[in-house]
Amino acid sequence: MHIIKSWFWPGVITVALLTALAMWFLTDPIDRELTDAANNALDTGNPWASAEIDGRDLVLKGIAPSEEALAEALKIVSATRGVRVVDNQATLLSLAVPFSFAVTKSDEGILLSGNVPYGDARARILAAAERAMPGIEILDEMAVARGAPPGFFDLVDFALVQAAQLTNGEVEISGETYNIRGTAANSNGYDSLNAALHTALPGNGKPGEVKLEVPASASNN
C-alpha cells in the first residue's frame, strides 16, 4: 500500500493540472470565436452595440438609439450559435422632452445647439447650415438624443434659411413650436421673415414667440 500511495496522489494532481490547462487553452479560442460571431452579426445594422463572451454567456453593451434597435440587437446575439445566456447591459439613448434645437447667430458666427437625432443627422444639419450661411463659422454643440418629432428636419431647414436673414438673433424649435427672435438684415428681410411665418410652417411646426426687429438704419429711412 505504501508503494501505491507514493505514486497515486502525484499522478492525480498531474492529471488535474493537465486537464485544467487544456480547458483554459480551449476555452479562450471558443470565447474569441463566439465574440467574433456575435460582433460580426451586430456590425451590419447596429454599430452602437458590442458583445463580450464569458464562457458561453454573452454580455451586450452599448447605447441603443431606440427601443427597436435594442430589441433587434438582443435578437441577433441571442441567435448566435453556442451562446447560452445573454446579459443585457446596454442602455437607451437619453430621451429629450421636449426635443429642442436652436440656431444662434452673432458677430462671432453660428451656434447650433439643442438635440440632434442619432446617425447621420448631425452631418446633415451641418451641411444644411453651410448651404444656408456659407463662409460663416459654425460651432456645433448639439447633443444626440431620442424623441425627434416627425418633420424635424424640414423645420430645421426652414429655421436655418430664416436665421440666414438675421444679423443676430436666435431661431429655436421646441418640440413642434417655432420661436424666432432677432434683428433682420434689412427691411426686405424683415418682410420676408414675417411673410413666411404667416404661412403653414413645414414639419408640422406651430408658431410660438415671434420677436423681430428691423435694423436702425432701415427704420430711419
Image: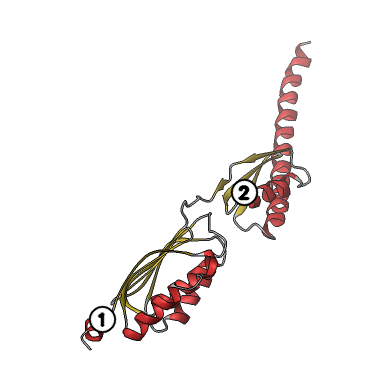
Image vertical order of residue 172 relative to residue 215, above or below: above
Badge 2 is on which residue? 67
Q: Residue at x 70, y 33 (%)?
A: 20
Q: Quadrant of residue 194?
A: bottom left
Q: Name above or below for residue 61 compared with residue 187.
A: above
Q: Is residue 123 visible?
A: no
Residue 32: x and y, percent? 69, 49
Quadrant of the rendered structure where residue 100 is? bottom left
In this rendered view, identify the residue nearer to me: 8 or 20: 20
Q: Position of residue 193 (x, y in %)?
A: 40, 77
Residue denoted by label 1: 215
Tell which tag, 2 or 1, sits nearer the viewer. 1
Q: Secondary structure at mark 2?
A: helix
Q: What distance separates the C-alpha of mark 2 from that of mark 1?
A: 48 Å
Residue at x-position 75% and y-position 12%: 2
Question: In the depicted view, which residue is nearer to us: 36 or 204?
Answer: 204
Identify the amino acid type marked 1: Pro
Q: Mark 2 Cα within 10 Å, few/some/many (few <14, many 20+)?
A: few
